[in-house]
Image (spheres, grey):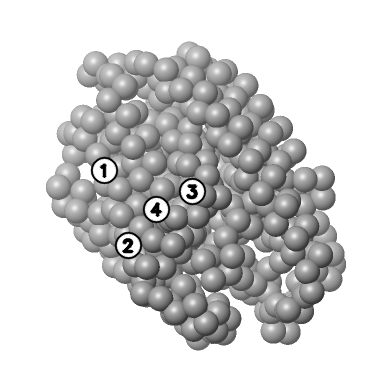
C-alpha cells in the first residue's frame, strides 16, 4: 500500500493511533520474545537447566493469563485509554525489575510481575482497534500494528543481543524501559478518550464478574476461545528453544543470531502490510489457510536441520515467518469481529488470557520434551515441530467455523439499519 492510498483510507489522527499502538506493542512483544534469544546465554550465565529456563518463559505467560482473565470483567467498565495506561505503567516497572535481577529466582519473580501487567495490554490494544476501525479495513490496521513484531525482530532483538553480549543480559530490559516511558507519556498526552462502549454499558449495567460470566456463557465466544488456545499452543511450542536449537544443533554462533532475526524481521516488515491488504481483499480465511499450509511445510524442514549455512537458515526462517504471519493477521482480525461492542473488552481479555496460559503450557511441555546433555545438541526438537503442525491444522478446522459465524454476523449487520456512521473516528 502506498502512502497516498493509506492517507485516503485513514486520517492523520487514525494513523497516529495506529503508530502509538504499534510502538507500545513493540515494547511488549520485545520484552516477551527477547527471552528466547537470550536462552543460551541465560542458561550459561545463571547455570540453569532447560527446565528452569522453560519456567522463566512460562512464568510470564501464566501470570499474564491469570491477570487477563481477572481483568476481563473490568475491561469494558473504563475508558480504554486509561485502562491501557495503567497496565503499561505496571509493565514498565516489571521490566525494570528484570533489568536489575541478579539470580534465577529474582528474574522469575520479575517475569511474573511483568506478565501480570503486560498480559493485558494486547487485549486492550485489540479492543481499541476493533472499536475505532471497521472490519473492511481492520486487517490493514492489524498488518501495521503487528509490524511491531517484525520491528522487534529487525531492530529490537539484534540490538538486545548485541547489548547483552557487550554489557550483560540485563541490558535489553533496561533498553525497553528507556524507550517505553516516552511512549506512555505520548499516549497520555495526545490520545483522546476511547469510551464509546461506556454508554452501552450503562444500558446493560452489571457487575464485573457478572459481565465476565455472561461473556463466558455464549457458545460462539467459547468456540473462539478454544480455537485461540489451539492456535497459540501450536504456534508457541517451538519458540522457547528456537534460538538454542540454532546455536546447539544448527551451529549458528551467538554472534550470528542477530543476523538471523534481522533479515527475518526485515522480510516480515514487507510481508505484513501485503498480507493485511490481501486478507481484506480476497478473504481472511483463504489467506489463513494458505499460511497454515506454508508454515507446516517449513516447520517440517526447520526441525530436521543439521549443521546449515547461515544464508540457508535465514531463507528458511523468512519463508516460515511468512507463513506464520499469513495466519496471525487474518486470525486476529476474525477474532476481533466475533464479540459485540458491549462485550469486546471482556472477550479480548479472556482471549489474551488464554493465549498467555496456552503459551505457558506450551513452554512447560517444550521444557519437558527437550533434553540436552551438557552443551551438546538439543534432542527431540523435531517432536515439538510435528506436534505444532498437528495443532495448527486442528486450529485451522476450528477457524472455519469462526469465519462462518463472522460472515453471518456481517450479513445481518449490513441488512440492519445503521445506528452509527461508518467513520467512527474523530477527524
- Residue at 43% x, 55% y is 216
- Name which of mark 4 and mark 1 comes first in the sequence: 1
Quadrant of the rendering where the N terminus is positioned:
bottom right
- Residue at 48% x, 32% y is 234
Kind of element beneath mark 1: helix
Q: Which residue is mark 1?
A: 56
Q: Which residue is mark 3?
A: 222
- Across and down, in percent, residue 201 comes to 50, 79
Query: Is the C-beta separation of discs 2 and 1 under 8 Å?
Result: no
From what the image shows, is residue 381 above or below residue 75?
above
Tell me the distance, in whole angstroms, between the alpha carbons under discs 2 and 3. 17 Å
Tell me the distance, in whole angstroms, between the alpha carbons under discs 3 and 4. 13 Å
Kind of element beneath mark 2: helix
Q: Nearer the viewer, mark 3 or mark 4?
A: 3
- Residue at 37% x, 34% y is 362
Left or right, 101 with reference to 199: left
- Name which of mark 3 and mark 4 comes first in the sequence: 3
Query: Is the C-beta separation of discs 4 and 1 under 8 Å?
Result: no
What is the crowding at mark 4: few (fewer than 14 residues within 10 Å), some, or many (at least 20)?
many
Q: Which mark is residue 384?
A: none
- Name which of mark 2 and mark 3 comes first in the sequence: 2
Tell me the distance, in whole angstroms, between the alpha carbons under discs 4 and 1. 18 Å
Query: Is the C-beta separation of discs 3 and 1 under 8 Å?
Result: no
- Across and down, in percent, residue 326 comes to 66, 40
In front of the other: 412 or 185: 412
Quadrant of the rendering where the C terminus is positioned:
bottom right
Tell me the distance, in whole angstroms, between the alpha carbons under discs 3 and 1. 29 Å
Tell me the distance, in whole angstroms, between the alpha carbons under discs 4 and 2. 9 Å
Amino acid at each position: 500500500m502506498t502512502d497516498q492510498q493509506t492517507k485516503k483510507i485513514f486520517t492523520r489522527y487514525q494513523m497516529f493511533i495506529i503508530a502509538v499502538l504499534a510502538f507500545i506493542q513493540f515494547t511488549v512483544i520485545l520484552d516477551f520474545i527477547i527471552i528466547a534469544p537470550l536462552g543460551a546465554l541465560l542458561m550459561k550465565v545463571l547455570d540453569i537447566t532447560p527446565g528452569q529456563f522453560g519456567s522463566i518463559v512460562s512464568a510470564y505467560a501464566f501470570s499474564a493469563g491469570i491477570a487477563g482473565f481477572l481483568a476481563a470483567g473490568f475491561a469494558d467498565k473504563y475508558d480504554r485509554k486509561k485502562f491501557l495506561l495503567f497496565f503499561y505503567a505496571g509493565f514498565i516497572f516489571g521490566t525494570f525489575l528484570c533489568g536489575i535481577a541478579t539470580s534465577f529466582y529474582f528474574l522469575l519473580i520479575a517475569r511474573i510481575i511483568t506478565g501480570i501487567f503486560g498480559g493485558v495490554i494486547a487485549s486492550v490494544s485489540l479492543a481499541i482497534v476493533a472499536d475505532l476501525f471497521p472490519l473492511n479495513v481492520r486487517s490493514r490496521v492489524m498488518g501495521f500494528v503487528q509490524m511491531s513484531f517484525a520491528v522487534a525482530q529487525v531492530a529490537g532483538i539484534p540490538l538486545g543481543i548485541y547489548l547483552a553480549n557487550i554489557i550483560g543480559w540485563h541490558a535489553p530490559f533496561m533498553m525497553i524501559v528507556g524507550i517505553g516511558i516516552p511512549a506512555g507519556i505520548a499516549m497520555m498526552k495526545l490520545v483522546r478518550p476511547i469510551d464509546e462502549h461506556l454508554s452501552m454499558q450503562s444500558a446493560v449495567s452489571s457487575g464485573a464478574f457478572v459481565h465476565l460470566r455472561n461473556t463466558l456463557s455464549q457458545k460462539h465466544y467459547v468456540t473462539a476461545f478454544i480455537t485461540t488456545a489451539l492456535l497459540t499452543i501450536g504456534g508457541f511450542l517451538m519458540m522457547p528453544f528456537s534460538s538454542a536449537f540454532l546455536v546447539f544443533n544448527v551451529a549458528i554462533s551467538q554472534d550470528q543470531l542477530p543476523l538471523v532475526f534481522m533479515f527475518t524481521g526485515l522480510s516480515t516488515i514487507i510481508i505484513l502490510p501485503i498480507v493485511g491488504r490481501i486478507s481484506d481483499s480476497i478473504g481472511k480465511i483463504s489467506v489463513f489457510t494458505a499460511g497454515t499450509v506454508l508454515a507446516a511445510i517449513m516447520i517440517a524442514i526447520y526441525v530436521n536441520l543439521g549443521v546449515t549455512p547461515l544464508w540457508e537458515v535465514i531463507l528458511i526462517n523468512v519463508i516460515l515467518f511468512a507463513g506464520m504471519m499469513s495466519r496471525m493477521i487474518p486470525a486476529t482480525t476474525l477474532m476481533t469481529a466475533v464479540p459485540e461492542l458491549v462485550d469486546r473488552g471482556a472477550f479480548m481479555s479472556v482471549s489474551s488470557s488464554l493465549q498467555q496460559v496456552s503459551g505457558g503450557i506450551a513452554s512447560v511441555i517444550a521444557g519437558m520434551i527437550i533434553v540436552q546433555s551438557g552443551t551438546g545438541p538439543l534432542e527431540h526438537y523435531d517432536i515439538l515441530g510435528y506436534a505444532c503442525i498437528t495443532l495448527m491444522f486442528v486450529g485451522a478446522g476450528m477457524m472455519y467455523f469462526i469465519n462462518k459465524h463472522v460472515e453471518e454476523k456481517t450479513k445481518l449487520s449490513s441488512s440492519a439499519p445503521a445506528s452509527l456512521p461508518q467513520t467512527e473516528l474523530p477527524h
